Image (cartoon, rainbow, N blue to C red):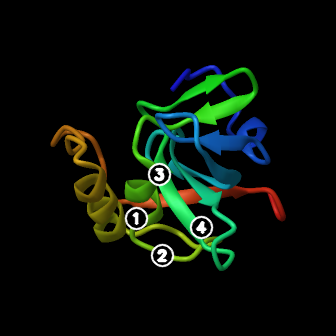
Amino acid sequence: MQSDIDPRSLIGRKAFDRHGARIGTVDEVYLDDATGEPEWAAVRTGLFSRDAFVPLEPSEVVDDTLRVPYERALIKDAPDFGVGRHLSPEQELQLYHHYGLALPAPDTPSDEGLGTVNGANG
């Protein structure tokens, strides 16, 4: 994702899958505690008011929307950790595995977890 984007500006944007199907609306953005970089977004799917976590890398902001390069079904099946809480390293690892993403480099401090930027309190 473009690193010059303010994570707060993502909140409220519509999110779409790789085929242009609407997933929902970005509810919260999770930042890496060590780097402060945005890593995950919680997208309110509307399905039972559930939030699905999506990776911000390799997602893109296009025409004021978040384009997530994964199938809608995979996104909706992402682990549900609730929102508004810190993501633990174990939860983040589950998300990496779910999306088939390469794990962060070993020298990257990943044992600190992820904090959140949210629309309601952020």
What amino acid is labelled 2 in the image?
Answer: Phe
Which residue reaches farthest right? Answer: 120
Residue corresponding to mark 3: 72
Residue corresponding to mark 1: 78
Could you say which quadrant of the image residue 82 lies in?
Answer: bottom right
From the viewer's perspective, is residue 108 above or below residue 6? Answer: below
Marks 1 and 4 sit apart, C-alpha to C-alpha, by 9 Å
Q: Nearer the viewer, residue 66 or 16?
A: 16
Residue 33 visible in the displayed image: no
First in residue order: circle 1 vs circle 3: 3
**68 sits left or right of 63 in the view:** left
Residue corresponding to mark 2: 81
Label 3 Cα crowd, 10 Å radius (few <14 / some 14-19 / many 20+): some
What amino acid is labelled 3 in the image?
Answer: Arg
Marks 3 and 4 sit apart, C-alpha to C-alpha, by 13 Å
Label 2 Cα crowd, 10 Å radius (few <14 / some 14-19 / many 20+): some
What amino acid is labelled 4 in the image?
Answer: Asp
Q: Position of residue 112 (x, y in %)?
A: 38, 60
Q: Residue at x 43, y 46 (%)?
A: 34
Numbered badge on residue 51 = 4
Q: Nearer the viewer, residue 15 or 5?
A: 15
